[in-house]
Amino acid sequence: MPQSKIVIYGGTWCSDCRRAKRFFDSHKIQYQWVDLDNDTEALGYVLTVNNGKRVIPTIVFEDGSVLVEPTDAELSEKLSITR
């Protein structure tokens, strides 16, 4: 299976992360999940992207764009999903 081009950086304890994962799952959009509690390199990346802050979920898309703590509406807009 090809690796997803969308990466969600977060933590299992984070309710916003779980909501983002549910959004992708409900729309059958593949993504890669990176648990920052188990990946110090990924945590460093998130800190860099967010100016030293651990703000999650941080979602990186194939085009290189990043959304931080996006709402479902922001994700829908980014992915051109209409309901």
Image (spheres, rainbow, N blue to C red):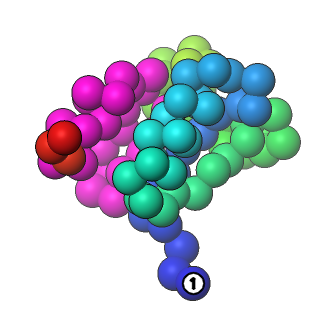
Q: How many marks?
A: 1
Residue that extends furthest to the bottom in the rendered view of this protein:
1
In the depicted view, which residue is nearer to us: 41 or 60? 60
Q: Say which of 58 and 70 sits in front.
A: 70
| Residue at mark 1 | 1
> Where is residue 35 drawn, in percent x and y?
73, 41
Secondary element at image label 1: loop
- Horizontal placement of 31 versus 9: left or right? left
Instruction: Specify whether residue 8 is painted magenta.
Output: no
Residue 4 place in picture, x, y as percent: 49, 67
Q: Tell me if 30 is positioned left or right of 37 in this view.
A: left
**Quarter of the image where one finds residue 52:** top right
The residue lying at 56 percent from left, 22 percent from top is 16
Q: Does the stretch in magenta take in 77?
A: yes
- In this rendering, the answer to whether 40 lies above or below 74 is below
* Three-letter amino acid code at the position of disc 1: Met
On the question of residue 44 being in view, the answer is no
Local packing at callout 1 (Cα closer than 10 Å; few below 14, some 14-19, many 20+) is few
Chain part drawn in magenta:
56-80
4 horizontally vs 66: left or right: right
Q: Say whether residue 42 is left or right of residue 8.
A: right
Question: Residue 17 or 38: which is nearer the viewer?
Answer: 17
Q: Is 53 placed above or below 32 here?
A: above
Q: Residue at x 27, y 56 (%)?
A: 63
Q: Residue furthest right?
A: 38
